């Protein structure tokens, strides 16, 4: 059961999670991260590292965010791997917890 990055990551993009991943399954887009489900080994290391609780096991994705399972799979094939921590996006703390961010996703 792979892990999934969900909506709260959009416009925040904290990258604390990428440094603990032993298989480099995170991919970086302009304002969002995704996990490659084919590379994820379900180690659980990334989930507690996310300061905004945007990472869930596939079976635990919150109601209404199930579409992020397919979105992670799709975008992980297009975006480059990220393995080192970067600063979050400007204003990330202001975007934490805001609903309805999917239309703001930059591809």
Image (spheres, helix red, strand yellow):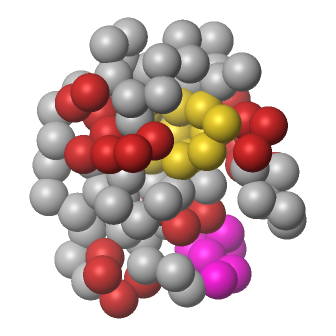
Q: Which residues are magenta?
A: 99-107
Side of 103 where 92 appears, left or right = left
Principal secondary structure, stretch drawn in magenta = loop
The answer, for residue 93, to whether it is visible in the render is: yes
Residue 44: horizontal and vertical position, in percent?
48, 28
Relative height, residue 5 to residue 46 (above, below): below
Side of 35 where 71 appears, left or right = right
Q: Is residue 93 magenta?
A: no
Relative height, residue 82 to residue 102 (above, below): above
Residue 3: horizontal and vertical position, in percent?
60, 32
The answer, for residue 107, to whether it is visible in the render is: no
Residue sitting at x 53%, y 31%: 35
Q: Nearer the viewer, residue 10 or 3?
A: 3
Q: Nearer the viewer, residue 51 or 103?
A: 51
Residue sitting at x 74%, y 50%: 61
Residue 18: horizontal and vertical position, in percent?
30, 33
Residue 80: horizontal and vertical position, in percent?
38, 28
Side of 27 where 74 appears, left or right = right
């Amino acid at each position: 059961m792979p892990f999934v990055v969900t909506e709260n990551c959009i416009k925040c993009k904290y990258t604390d999670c990428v440094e603990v991943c032993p298989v480099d399954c995170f991919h970086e887009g302009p304002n969002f991260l995704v996990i490659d489900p084919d590379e994820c080994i379900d180690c659980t290391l990334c989930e507690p590292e996310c300061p905004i609780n945007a990472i869930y096991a596939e079976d635990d994705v919150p109601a209404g965010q199930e579409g992020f399972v397919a979105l992670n799979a799709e975008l992980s094939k297009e975006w480059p791997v990220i393995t080192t921590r970067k600063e979050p996006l400007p204003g990330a703390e202001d975007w934490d917890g805001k609903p309805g961010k999917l239309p703001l996703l930059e591809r």
